[in-house]
Image (tube, grey):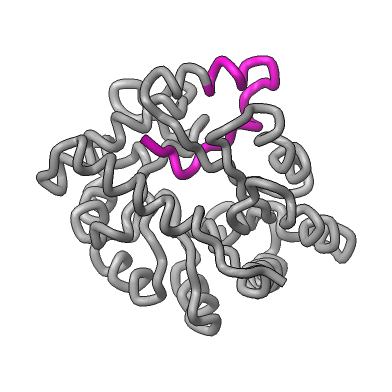
Amino acid sequence: MTDSHVHLTMFDAKERKAVLRQAQEAGVTRLLVPATGAEDLEEVAHLPQELGEGVFVALGFHPHQASQLDSGWKKRLERLLSWPQVVAVGEIGLDFFYCHSPKEDQLKAFSWQLDLAQAWGLPVVLHQRQAWPDFLATLGSRQPLRGVAHSFTEGTAGVRAVQQFGLFVGISGMITFPKANNVREAAREAEATMLLVETDAPYLAPVPHRGKTNHPAWVRLVAEAVARERQMTLEELEAQTDENFAQLFLHPTPGP
């Protein structure tokens, strides 16, 4: 199985190998770890060397840290994109719920990083919260685009909108939450070839672990829930999402 979104650097450095080993014992053979910004960009870039085979990374500035993306950090980000096992630009996007960075700074950082990804021929890992109109408008001005809208919550209509842009849909452990009908709708609506599963660990632990620190080993619980919604076997869902991950992240187009 593949966990397409897990923040391994948010686990204590002494725990990471054990967390990874637990995931591998549960059958999780590939993980994608996104950066969030200045505080972990270089640490994430070093993870494949630290943890070994099966760990891939995305590098970028989360909207919470958009205000920190100055010219110096832009140069460092561009330099790090050439490192081995860097397969995407992310986690990037817009978050108008918390607004830890002003909206104007978020829009500028988002646009610049989308352009950077296109220049490098890399897919993007996208975050969106309560910024849907601006999110779609920014994406729509930059076509064609490859990437995933992670931890998707925008229901049936939202899936149709992002898939028109060529984006995959990432389903997290929220699919197991009793009130998350929007996530279950998204899981059913997504095209089979444009669907991924993720944990977003250490956040969003699925039922029956809700409220605990999430772990990549629990992506199987997410996959089981998605399979039920799509009336597939777990084995069929695993095979499809593994192939989807490979198609999106492991078949790169030429960079600069």
For the point 50% across and 81% down, the residue is: 143
Vertical relation: 100 (above or below) 104: above
Residue toward you, 111 or 20: 20
Quarter of the image for residue 176 reads top left
Task: Tell me: 8 left or right of 164.
Answer: right
Residue 45 vertical position relative to residue 189 in the rendered view, above or below: above
Picture coordinates of residue 133, whole percent (x, y): 45, 74
Q: Is residue 228 left or right of residue 164?
A: left
163 or 193, which is in the foreground? 193
Q: Can you see residue 68?
A: no
Q: Residue at x 56, y 58 (%)?
A: 95
What x and y, as percent, mark residue 213? 49, 23
**Membership of 11 in magenta stretch:** yes
Q: For residue 15, what is the image quadrant? A: top right
**Magenta part of the protein: which range?**
1-20
Number of callouts in the render? Answer: 0
User: Which residue does the image show at 32% across and 54% down from the upper left?
Assistant: 195
Whether residue 116 is visible: yes
Q: Quadrant of residue 216?
A: top left
- Residue lying furthest right: 72
The residue nearer to you, when weighing 219 against 201, is 219
**Residue, far bottom:** 141
* x then y, percent, for residue 159: 30, 65
Check if residue 146 falls in the magenta segment.
no
Residue found 41% across the figure and 25% down from its top:
217
Quarter in which the N terminus is drawn: top left
With 228 as the anchor, is 210 left or right in this view?
right
- Quadrant of the image for the C terminus? bottom right
For the residue pair 181 and 171, the one nearer the viewer reads as: 171
User: Is the residue 143 above or below the residue 254 in the image?
Assistant: below
